[in-house]
Amino acid sequence: MTTIKSYADLSQSKTLSKILSHESADFGWNVFVDGTSRILPINDWDLVKDGSGNVKFFHAWSLAALLEQLPYELCDDDGNSSYLQINKEDDVYQIVYTDPYGDFESIETDRYDDFVDACYEMILKLNKLNLL
């Protein structure tokens, strides 16, 4: 059985920490001095955020938290709208903002085996376009 990625990996989380509000994170990565890491849900953060030098903490986002960051509708200065569309074809995922009237150019991700990766890419694209 294939394992489904359900949260941003450590590298993605480090990047997202520079873009998203830390309050929107629902997980946290703990990186230990020996290089090992683990991810914990928000309810367990206080157990490891003790301020010791043995653990580095990074905010992290689950798939559900990432989806919450994607607006359903994008509007331009002229009032034209583009709408969130989630595609799953075979076993790959893609996120697209599409305008049913053709006033907007579509914004789309590559196709990914993991939905988390598509969400991550779209958040980066929307941030670059100042649409978050």
Image: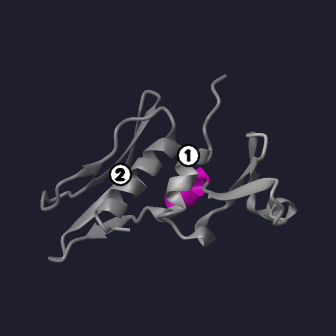
Residue 57 in the figure: left or right of residue 62? right
Pick the front one: 23 or 14: 14
Q: Is residue 130 magenta?
A: no
For residue 64, which quarter of the picture? bottom right
Identify the main secondary structure in magenta: helix
Which residue position holds label 1?
A: 11
**What residue is drawn where x is 47% and y is 64%?**
19
Residue 41 coordinates in the image, percent (x, y): 75, 56
Q: Residues within 10 Å of mark 1 (few under 14, many from 20)?
A: few
For residue 100, which quarter of the picture? bottom left
Type of amino acid under label 2: Gln
Per the rendering, the mark at residue 86 is: none
Which residue position holds label 2?
A: 85
**What residue is drawn where x is 60% and y is 56%?**
61
CA–CA distance in space, label 1 to label 2: 26 Å
The total of numbered circles placed on residues is 2
Pick the front one: 24 or 93: 24
Q: Is residue 65 magenta?
A: yes
Q: Quadrant of the N terminus?
A: top right
Q: Which residues are magenta?
A: 62-67
Q: Residues within 10 Å of mark 2 (few under 14, many from 20)?
A: few
Type of amino acid under label 1: Ser
Eye-nearest disc, 1 or 2: 1
Residue 77 in the figure: left or right of residue 8? left
Q: Quadrant of the C terminus?
A: bottom left
Residue 56 in the figure: left or right of residue 126? right
Q: Of marks 1 and 2, which one's residue comes earlier in the chain?
A: 1
